Image (spheres, grey):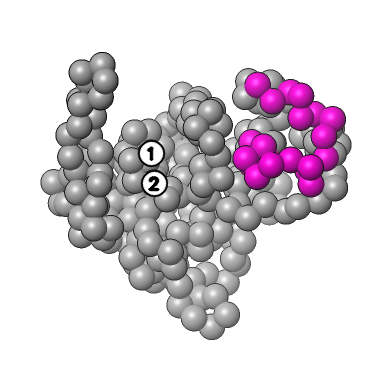
């Protein structure tokens, strides 16, 4: 379990997160939503030790994050950032450091990328390689910063399969989404930030009942019928 209480984070002297309190439980996928500048990336970074001078408390299984040593932190969290480093390192050299990533690359049908260099890959391919490396970590919390933003439909399905597999393993997945419909299709709960404050946390029923998408994103649910006659809920 991850417990956040009264979290306040400043970035270059400006308060970016304020009074954020929430609990994340094992075996659940949390969709992190918010407009640009709402604090999503800052929250993900705070939960994965990017910031050390935050105010408030971040506890993993009862232990304060900033009191942990580096090895302890590696066991409790892993992050896939929104902006990935671009280098001429080969995929195989990275897999030699994180050998567990090889099976995840195979599962994604991307083993052919093994002998390529990162700077020769497309944005989506590079994202999937880094996701495979991330999945090789044995962590409690997996933080994903808009992992699907640069992915085509095939890779989006693969990333969602990875999230569901982590859920089955009783891990915690906290992923920011740009597309509310993608988030609604996979997440168990939703966390919405607005201007650095937590304005909603709850499941699908509460998300709909409180018109959260309408209040904060100007989107409203509609029931559409696809070609097979199946009804689908979409926010438009």
**Depth order, front residue of 41/232:** 232
User: Which stretch did the figure color magenta?
Assistant: 109-128
Residue 73 located left or right of residue 223: right
What secondary structure do most residues of the magenta stretch adopt?
helix
From this view, report whether residue 106 is shown above or below residue 16. Answer: above
Identify the residue shown where x is 36% and y is 70%. 195
> Looking at the image, can residue 19 be seen?
no
Say if the magenta span includes residue 120: yes
> What SS does tag 2 mark?
loop
Name which quarter of the figure residue 109 lies in: top right
Q: Position of residue 114 (x, y in %)?
A: 80, 29
**Where residue 91 sits in the image (x, y, percent)?**
80, 36
Looking at the image, which residue sits at the far bottom? 13
* Relative vertical location of residue 65 with respect to residue 78 in this rendering, above or below: below
- Quadrant location of residue 197? bottom left
Residue 60, magenta (yes or no): no
Cα–Cα span, label 2 and label 1: 5 Å
Please give left or right for residue 54 compared with residue 201 in the image: right
What is the crowding at mark 1: few (fewer than 14 residues within 10 Å), some, or many (at least 20)?
A: some
SS at circle 1: helix
- Nearest the camera: 87 or 98? 87
Which residue is denoted by mark 2 in the rendering? 179
> Which residue position holds label 1?
182
């Amino acid at each position: 379990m991850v417990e956040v209480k009264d979290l306040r984070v400043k970035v270059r002297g400006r308060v970016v997160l304020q009074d954020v309190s929430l609990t994340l439980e094992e075996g659940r996928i949390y969709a992190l939503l918010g407009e640009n500048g709402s604090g999503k990336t800052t929250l993900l970074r705070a939960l994965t030790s990017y910031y050390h001078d935050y105010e408030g408390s971040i506890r993993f299984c009862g232990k304060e994050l900033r009191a942990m040593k580096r090895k302890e932190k590696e066991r409790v969290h892993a992050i896939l950032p929104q902006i990935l480093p671009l280098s001429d390192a080969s995929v195989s050299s990275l897999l030699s450091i994180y050998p567990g990533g090889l099976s995840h690359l195979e599962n994604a049908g991307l083993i052919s990328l093994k002998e390529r260099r990162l700077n020769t890959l497309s944005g989506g391919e590079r994202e999937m390689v880094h996701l495979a490396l991330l999945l090789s970590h044995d962590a409690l919390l997996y933080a994903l910063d808009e992992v699907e933003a640069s992915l085509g439909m095939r890779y989006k399905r693969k990333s969602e399969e990875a999230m569901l597999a982590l859920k089955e393993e009783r891990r915690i997945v906290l992923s920011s989404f740009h597309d509310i419909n993608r988030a609604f299709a996979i997440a168990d709960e939703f966390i919405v930030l607005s201007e650095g404050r937590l304005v909603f946390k709850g499941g699908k029923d509460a998300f709909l009942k409180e018109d959260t998408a309408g209040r904060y994103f100007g989107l409203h649910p509609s029931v559409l019928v696809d070609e097979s006659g199946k009804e689908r809920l979409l926010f438009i």
